[in-house]
Amino acid sequence: MSHHKKRVYPQAQLQYGQNATPLQQPAQFMPPQDTAAAGMNYAQMGMPSQAAMPPMGQQQFLTPAQEQLHQQIDQAATSMNDMHLHNVPLVDPNAYMQPQVPVQMGTPLQQQQQQQPLSTPAYGQSSATMGQNMRPMNQLYPIDLLTELPPPINDLTLPPPPLVIPPEKMLVPSELSNASPDYIRSTLNAVPKNSSLLKKSKLPFGLVIRPYQHLYDDIDPPPLNEDGLIVRCRRCRSYMNPFVTFIEQGRRWRCNFCRLANDVPMQMDQSDPNDPKSRYDRSEIKCAVMEYMAPKEYTLRQPPPATYCFLIDVSQSSIKSGLLATTINTLLQNLDSIPNHDERTRISILCVDNAIHYFKIPLDSESNEESTDQINMMDIADLEEPFLPRPNSMVVSLKACRKNIETLLTKIPLIFQSNLITSFALGPALKSAYHLIGGVGGKIIVISGTLPNLGIGKLQRRNESGVVNTSKETAQLLSCQDSFYKNFTIDCSKVQITVDLFLASEEYMDVASLSNLSRFTAGQTHFYPGFSGKNPNDIVKFSTEFAKHISMDFCMETVMRARGSTGLRMTRFYGHFFNRSSDLCAFSTMPRDQSYLFEVNVDESIMADYCYIQVAVLLSLNNSQRRIRIITLAMPTTESLAEVYASADQLAIASFYNSKAVEKALNSSLDEARVLINKSVQDILATYKKEIVVSNTAGGAPLRLCANLRMFPLLMHSLTKHMAFRSGIVPSDHRASALNNLESLPLKYLIKNIYPDVYSLHDMADEAGLPVQTEDGEATGTVVLPQPINATSSLFERYGLYLIDNGNELFLWMGGDAVPALVFDVFGTQDIFDIPIGKQEIPVVENSEFNQRVRNIINQLRNHDDIITYQSLYIVRGASLSEPVNHASAREVATLRLWASSTLVEDKILNNESYREFLQIMKARISK
């Protein structure tokens, strides 16, 4: 059976015309044009055209099961006619039996049966729930998980089950009228109408939200309303959106969230005479994702300038490791990349060891070539109550002091090059930075290579022996060692300060404690274990990520709230932010490379056929503008458990349980987190078997699930093997960093972290590794990637070349028995034992097209415009019978093989069972 067959969903609801006529437009607003001129046709209205309908009497190829069901429906229809039921609408019985999947000649009968939609109601369900007033809904396609091995990993790239919203529910039918999954993604694309059905399904209801898609705001921005008119419901305060209804000849509009009728402001129809527009041209009417320019009533103060306070470790370990030099060089090269759209950006630099070193930076206009000592350093050794010397001259304008900032950066390595102090007073330095920029808020960016060991917030190395891989691991290794790092974030939230951490050291850094600084201030912790300035690959990774971080756009003084229509309520929130109230998430600064998860509850029965979610983000951009970003999502509701399952989004559900597991690991124990992950799979499989699967299944006892959820067990099983959750000995810094990343990664990178992409390079297609060609034959900036294979060593040939991408690292696996020609094409040497191993880059081999293609693929995988991560490449040599026993790199090679093999998550890894064994265990549990 083919594992790469795409799911078949109803397509009619997606065929919207971009220039369609508003369906609810009153007569007085109707433009003088006919339907054809407006670009509307039957297909765009969700109705089949006559040309698309099969001719009368044309024979259709049906399976025996379909023919039998046809006969049953015909008999039922004849019986109903004989009963003379008056005033009952007639239904074409053939409408229920249109084949959803075209049957192909030569297709095995088993495949035909598995691909047919499961339309039979579960025991105890009313047949009336199937029709749902004849609304088109997603269909169930049952599959057997045990016969679909290896799993069809191409399903991980499929879009979620479509949101079946008919065009008549939108003011202007368009694909833009409902929010894209890139912005907001629901775990359920058909919402249960009551809480009992939601609980019965065992499926979670949550929203994966990513308000910004790119690091830089000038890439594909949503529409912006600049006229100052913001229309909101008087009762629920939701914003006007494409799903409201105009009533009373357009004088009023009905809120789709609470059903209240509101007056339409006169300004909606008062357009500029030079640019006449109707209300249906407004962004809030046409687009589910849009922005308002916020008026004064949404602003408490003038939007503050973007402010960066760099807190740099200048202790001995930072100097020896090369971290200080790397940081200074990166800042020098990227000063002009720091966002300064309104030319108000301000900079402050603090150096820290056993004292806090401030720098007075004069204006460029006050400096001249003869006076070189105008940049003054002031040392504060009193760490108990540090004060600010000349606070007004510590935070300076980037534009007005650009040259002097550069001069200072070039001097810092010289000032501290002979520093022998091993202390690092992070806590007092954070408090000083807080007082320095607390008046306006902004970012404190910490670059550290030393464990804080002086003053408030002093940390000690924890004893991991005897605690790792036990029930005490969370309490003793993953908890916050000093309450300062949590209490300080409360103060930061009050004055709009975010703390970002760049931790790079070969020693223990207590990431578990320090990461709280970024977790509760909407920041991020970046960890670089084993960093060495002598390794150019370490320098490239740190410099690339640090440069992208400081050049990334961000917004300040940000709050985000999600509203639900009647019956829906937000209950829990996950991600990096400060939860200010029961439904308001506060961000001192909102980054562009994180996502958030909101849990939703059905509080009361939903009477309507559709429900709505609206996310509103109030923010200040770093160009002095105050804006409101609106994201509106419409979803159908249902009373059918089968329809709930047919519309479940497996990737969003995986993200939901990932966030739950991270919370459990940090607050309870790793064992409880693993139990939660496994129980999520067991509950869904058991519920599907009990409520949906027909009991008299032919043959053996299959492990049934619907096709749109078949990758969910694989993702959850793979999550238990992730560094964040897997059993065994894992350094606490590595585990804490992994947990920190999992709770904030955007969805597509989260999935790659859980289930890595694996590419077979030695037999890749001829076009792989070459630029994508346009229709005119011109090369684009995108490279064709090979088709990924399953993450299992059973597909690895001993002579092959493979590339593994887990989102954080790249592993290039060269089979130990690879032919000399392949080794030479990639590395320029024919002896496989001469190739470099470990953290390396592939050398450039002249006249080798294959070498160029491999390097192109690696560069393409590293090319991101929506996240700052740069994956280091690790070269791994596979085992060989001719491998020397006492080879100099034998120990390093063994470690690399074990690390790379741990990413092959379908295999048995240490004490963790293989995916096939996992499914057998699940089958045994639900069969009890």
Image: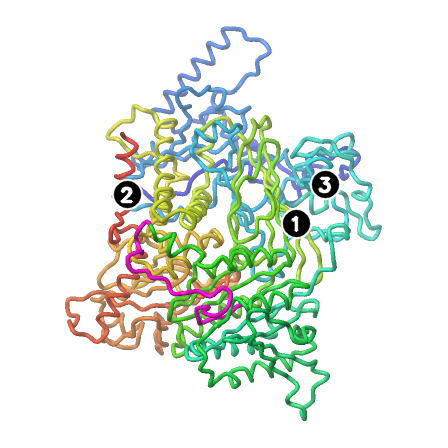
Q: Is residue 205 depicted above or below 307 in this figure?
A: above
The residue at which mark 3 appears reads as 232
Q: Are marks 3 and 2 in contact (CB under 8 Å)?
A: no
**Residue found 77% across the figure and 39% down from its top:** 32
Of badges 1 and 2, the one in the foreground is 2
Question: Disc 3 and disc 2: Cα gap in Å?
Answer: 51 Å
Give the mark nearer the N terminus: 1 vs 2. 1
Q: Give the left or right position of residue 793, taking residue 432 as reference.
A: left
Position of the C terminus, as image quadrant, is top left
Q: Pinpoint residue 715: horizontal percent, then vertical percent.
A: 37, 47
**Residue found 66% across the figure and 49% down from its top:** 290
Q: Give the left or right position of residue 489, taking residue 293 as reference.
A: left
Report the magenta residues as a range.
446-471
Question: Disc 1 and disc 2: Cα gap in Å?
Answer: 44 Å
Q: Amino acid at mark 1?
A: Met
| Element class at badge 2 | helix
Q: Pinpoint residue 31: horizontal percent, then vertical percent.
A: 76, 39
Question: Disc 1 and disc 3: Cα gap in Å?
Answer: 14 Å
The residue at which mark 2 appears reads as 918
The residue at which mark 1 appears reads as 290
Q: Amino acid at mark 3?
A: Arg
